[in-house]
Image (cartoon, rainbow, N blue to C red):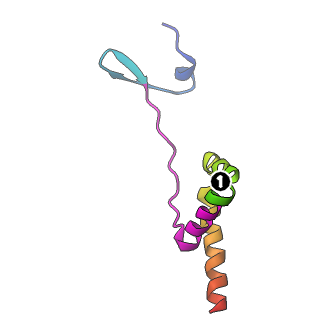
Amino acid sequence: MAQTLFEQNGGTYIQQGDYLLPDVKLLEQPKFEIGVWGNRRRQYLKHHHRINFYNMLHSVSCIHTLPISSQKAQKMFLRLI
């Protein structure tokens, strides 16, 4: 039996009953602490810039940008106090 393209690229299958299902796993994503300011930024984007918010969610860039904006906002807050 000829190998499928999935098998040629190193993929494997798992048998579940009568079916062969591809053995696919998501890549490990680093865990980030968003914090209060990151949550406020997320809520602002969600309510006022919906298109940008959903584009960020689908491209997974919010995982990286929200913690950075939260850290910057925290530094600004501490500087003011």
Who is closer to the viewer here, 20 or 61?
61
Is 30 inside the magenta-drawn segment? yes
**Quarter holding the C terminus?**
bottom right
- Residue 62 as seen in the image, left or right of residue 21: right
Who is closer to the viewer here, 53 or 61?
53
x and y, in percent, of residue 29 in the image: 52, 52
Q: Residues within 10 Å of mark 1 (few under 14, many from 20)?
A: some
Give the magenta-colored segment's residue range. 22-45
Q: Amino acid at mark 1?
A: Phe
x and y, in percent, of residue 73 in the image: 64, 77
Q: Is residue 22 above or below residue 58?
A: above
Is 26 inside the magenta-drawn segment? yes
Q: Going 66% across and 89% down the picture, which residue do you hit?
A: 79
Which residue in the protein does label 1 denote?
53
Q: Going 67% across and 48% down the picture, which residue do you hit?
A: 55
- Tell me the SS state at disc 1: helix
- Residue 13 as seen in the image, left or right of residue 16: right
Who is closer to the viewer here, 51 or 14?
51
The outermost residue toward the front is 47
